[in-house]
């Protein structure tokens, strides 16, 4: 079954907009909402029009002075974050943006929260929005992110009644690459299966190995943010953003091929169910081995007497 109908809606504005303006516009909007301020209130406070405020937040940010003025108004005076935003805007003519500067995770969260529609492709760890609490990501990534204090929270976890704007493409390797204890993986697969069966939740589709369209080792996102198409690679300590036909072509084509090869939701749910049963069987075998290794054994001491 072909899933070309599951591609994102067409952007309403040019896909050639550089990622710095799109990402930082979403970031400034998230900071405003975090303070509980309306666009009209901020426009009046900094003596500009509401239409100009709207342009700054929707991918038309060009000057560092505008971004820094708004950040100061929102109480974000951290010199490292301000320097990072200034430096990122100096890359505004490029269609590939490397962001590892202070606040990078906030900026990613801002894009994820603002996206009108999202496709996520993974072959390794699962995105945070579908994880159960017990699911643990790579220990190295946890260590590297331990010092981060995100101001902008991630998007809320998806449920059986939320997330219709999200399509999660699971490379089949996810089912054969347990990153947690078997019991946790079994519960995680059960959760994904429950989401898959819901008509009101996210679309979760399995991409078979034969398709050979695996994403990078990190998480790959395709988002529509304020009408702009944005590709993002999330790694442990940085994000790569792409816009424009040439810069984003590789990952756009990869995601489109994965969508076209994806199994129907019903078959995906069956595969998740089988993976859950396999993890439960592994957990039982490990438990039996643990019980056997803990049993007392008799052995003969020198002299021939039995001892425990």
Image (cartoon, grey):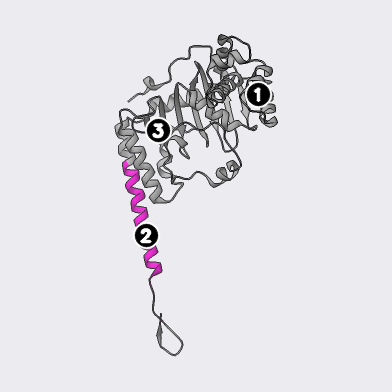
- Which residue is located at x 39 percent, y 43 percent? 188
Task: Tell me if 277 is positioned left or right of 23 in this view.
Answer: left
Q: Could you say where residue 235 lies in the image, as x and y percent from the top left?
A: 56, 36
Q: Circle 3 sits in a helix, a strand or a loop, which is it? A: loop
Residue nearest the viewer, comparing 226 with 82: 82
Q: Earlier in the sequence, mark 3 or mark 1?
A: 1
Q: Could you say where residue 265 lies in the image, as x and y percent from the top left?
A: 32, 31
Residue 72: numbered disc: 1
- For the residues labelled 3 and 1, the Cα–Cα distance comes to 33 Å
Q: Which residues are magenta?
A: 273-299
Residue nearest the viewer, comparing 202 with 286: 202
Mark 2: few/some/many CA within 10 Å (<14, 14-19, 20+):
few
Which quadrant of the structure image shows residue 35?
Answer: top right
Q: Earlier in the sequence, mark 2 or mark 1?
A: 1
| Labelled pair 3, 1 in contact (Cβ < 8 Å) | no
Which quadrant of the structure image shows residue 191?
Answer: top left
Q: Which residue is mark 2?
A: 287
Q: Is residue 213 something one can see in this rendering?
A: no
Q: Quadrant of the C terminus?
A: bottom left
Q: Earlier in the sequence, mark 2 or mark 3?
A: 3
Mark 1: few/some/many CA within 10 Å (<14, 14-19, 20+):
few
Q: Circle 2 sits in a helix, a strand or a loop, which is it? A: helix
Q: Which residue is mark 3?
A: 158
């Amino acid at each position: 079954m072909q899933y070309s109908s599951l591609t994102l809606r067409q952007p309403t504005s040019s896909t050639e907009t550089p990622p710095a303006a799109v990402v930082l516009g979403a970031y400034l909007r998230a900071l405003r909402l975090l303070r509980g301020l309306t666009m009209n209130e901020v426009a009046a406070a900094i003596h500009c029009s509401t239409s100009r405020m709207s342009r700054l937040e929707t991918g038309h940010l060009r000057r560092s002075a505008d971004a820094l003025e708004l950040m100061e108004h929102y109480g974000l005076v951290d010199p490292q974050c301000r320097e990072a935003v200034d430096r990122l805007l100096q890359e505004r003519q490029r269609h590939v943006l490397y962001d590892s500067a202070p606040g990078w995770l906030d900026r990613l969260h801002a894009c994820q929260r603002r996206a009108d529609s999202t496709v996520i492709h993974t072959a390794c760890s699962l995105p945070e929005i579908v994880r159960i609490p017990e699911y643990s990501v790579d220990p190295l990534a946890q260590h590297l992110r331990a010092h981060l204090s995100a101001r902008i929270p991630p998007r809320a976890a998806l449920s059986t009644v939320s997330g219709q704007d999200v399509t999660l493409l699971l490379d089949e390797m996810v089912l054969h690459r347990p990153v947690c204890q078997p019991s946790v993986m079994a519960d995680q697969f059960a959760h994904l299966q429950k989401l898959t069966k819901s008509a009101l939740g996210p679309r979760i589709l399995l991409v078979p190995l034969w398709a050979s369209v695996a994403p990078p080792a990190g998480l790959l996102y395709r988002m529509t943010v304020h009408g702009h198409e944005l590709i993002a690679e999330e790694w442990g300590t940085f994000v790569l953003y792409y816009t424009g036909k040439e810069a984003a072509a590789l990952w756009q084509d990869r995601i489109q091929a994965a969508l076209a090869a994806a199994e129907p939701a019903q078959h995906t749910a069956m595969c998740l169910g089988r993976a859950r049963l396999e993890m439960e069987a592994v957990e039982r075998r490990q438990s039996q081995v643990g019980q056997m290794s803990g049993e007392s054994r008799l052995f003969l001491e020198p002299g021939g007497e039995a001892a425990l």
